[in-house]
Amino acid sequence: MHLCGELLQNPALIGFLDNIPGMVYAIKLHRKKGGKVTISVQKIYNFLCSVKLAVTLFFLLAIGSIAGTLIEQGLPPEEYIKEYGERWYYWISLLRLTDVYHNWWFSLLLALLAINLAVCLSKRLPYIWRAYSAVDCDFTHNLVENFKHHTVIQFQGNIEEAKRKVEDILKGRKYKLWFENNPQNISILAAKGAIGRLGSPISHISIFLILIGAVLSSAVGFRSFYPFFEGEPVYIQEGNFSVVMDKFWIDYYENGGIKDYFSNLSVIDNGKMVTTKTIQVNDPLQYKGVWFYQSSYGTAWDRLDKVYIRITDKKSGKVVADETLDFRKEKGVAGTDLRLTASNFVSHFAFDSQTKQIFAKSAEHENPAVQLEINEGGKLIATPWIFYKYPNMFPIEKSKYNFVLAGYTAPQYSGLQIAKDPGVNLVWAGSILLMVGLFVSFFIFHRRFWIKIEPSEKNTLIYIGGITNKDHFGFEKEMDGIIKSF
Amino acid sequence: MFNSYFLFDIIFWVYLIAACCYIFYLSIRKEIVGHLAFALTVIGWLGNTAALAARTMETGRAPYANLYETMILLSWLIVMCYLVIEIKYLRLRVLGAIIVSIAFLAIGAAAMLPYRYQVAEPLIPALQSNWLILHVITTFVGYAGFAVAFGLGILYLFKERAERKKGFSFFDRFPSAELLDDLGYRFIALGFPFVTLGIILGAIWANYAWGGYWSWDPKETWSLIVWFIYAGYFHGRLVRGWRGRKTAYFSIIGFLAVIFLYWGVSFVLPGLHAYA
């Protein structure tokens, strides 16, 4: 049985093992014709545990991933039509190539990979375990001579001396030894690096863990972007607490490049401030499993600090006043019967004809506009939108004055990524296991020697034969070294 | 004198001459040429080390924060891999002809980058992290292993053909196809765990900086593609017993994917990894 593990490395035997279920099926078929249930189950099992399936899945996942990087993901349909044309867009949307990594067939491939992994592992684990733990000293020198790497050494001395010599040499090379003293001869089994056998199952289990973690992440985790304005608390539903950004600032390099940016955050739970931290890029805040990452910053698209309005008299064309308004605060204009309020702002003016709503098309200040509430002679006479880039486009008929948006200052927001991910720890656990598995598997080799010591007419014969699971080149060197030591 | 650009220029020429010496050594069987090639490679590598050290001192950070610098790091690692082979197995000296050439090509490609890619800009906020040091070095140890395996894979295909045809051939001096195949495997077996570690460290870092360990950005996705290719290689080789030409093709395709991951994604596909 001790050869079993070794034979498992042998491609011919793998083919044979893969065919065992096939043979079982042939026999069953022979016994009772029409046993269709056993056939299909067997076939599915064969399919699910084949390495061919694994390699095919790697290939398909790679192809899908490539498609996902070549075709930009998650754009609105019209963008694709513009880029590729109607006909191609039909195929792109049919194959769900606009969201490759989350579509049904990509998920299906990943699920198949997980199943393949589990079935394959359950099939191979017993063999691997046996190869790892097998100790069998019951063999003849014929077995030793069957190994690809084997030799016979003429040793000057009796069997006991030969045994001691073997022990010295192999223990010096960190081998673990098992002995069997027979009346006529001595059998020795020497092994090292058996742990290397476990590398493969460990790394496969770890991939399974990572996949489960990823599923957990996307099923229960959340991740969203939120702009924070100074002093405005944001309620975090997922953790039932609030966070206030007290202050935001940017540090610059001497050459004007951005060095880093910071937000001072306070967590308010149950009406009390529980913790505070200055976060920056690469240094997040964590509270109750919810993480706050500094991810960007920008200028507000829906609010302002100050609004500068130039008011001119329609008749004379003279400037009546240059007024500075606080956003959403009514102010009387000295020397007139005007009271003005800058009530709304959009950075990129857009009008939805269906809902009759005005909104900011983007956070860029492409076409800034302010809605002005004009109170003239004690009553509200108009609420026009005035445009920074297009002054005097729509004069206000009911008013004696013209109003021009001369400028404004907008507050900065700090863009925070907020995330809670219960799957992440499973992913890390899987990752650590994966590294352990890979390093064990690739850098620790299971090397074994079978040694038979037998007396001959003149002296003692030492038969040495050995195998390794990997690194045959290094193994030959090791074997040469051992033989030279005699 | 210890300006990093000056040193980069020096190692460009030293590696070029060393690679030529190795190729020359292949055609004339004079050991002295081989010794010269080896000595030049060692000098080039020391210069490469000094260049990285100078860059560290000039910038006060890890010397591999942009495309140009990582190319210098890559050639340093490739040559180091090669020196280990040569010191361990003197009879494999002829491999220098291909591996040192690859290292030279890496330096050459870096030298051809426009100047704005070569200058050491201060780090943007996202890169200011100790994870940078670990993530980049592990990834590039992996790339270096794949690069060496790529060279061995090409050599294998030529050698194998020469062996089939028998008779005198230019490739007689190269190690046997079997040995090239085995060595190629060993370098992929070195590269794979390191690239995996690089991906994992990148995921940890991304999670810490952006709040998500995987966001399917092109660089991440291509690293996964590369990972799949080499994972396929191992399953074919270790389980199904593929050897020789099949695995040689794999190591070539795998490294072409690495080149795309490394250069193609940076220049062709936009994404979070826009800086390198």
Image: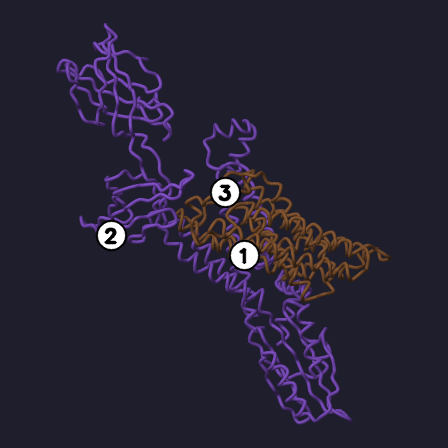
State whether discs 3 and 2 lie on one chain: no
Mark 2 or 1 closer to N-term? 1
- Residue at mark 3: B275
Mark 3, secondary structure of its residue: loop
- Mark whose residue sits in front, 2 or 1: 2
Q: Which chain does purple denote in the image?
A: A
Q: Position of residue A196 (x, y in %)?
A: 56, 69
In the image, is residue A19 above or below residue A167? above
Q: What label sits on residue B215 in the rendered view?
A: none
Q: Position of residue A333 (x, y in %)?
A: 17, 18
Mark 1, secondary structure of its residue: helix
Kind of residue sitting beneath label 1 = Asn
Numbered disc total? 3
- Mark whose residue sits in front, 3 or 1: 3
Is the C-beta separation of discs 3 and 2 under 8 Å? Answer: no
Q: Nearer the viewer, residue B66 or A50?
A: B66
Relative to A6, is A276 on the left or the right? left
Kind of residue sitting beneath label 2 = Thr
Is the C-beta separation of discs 2 and 1 under 8 Å? Answer: no
Callout 1: 10 Å neighbours few (<14), some, many (20+)?
many
- Residue at mark 2: A275
- Residue at mark 1: A116
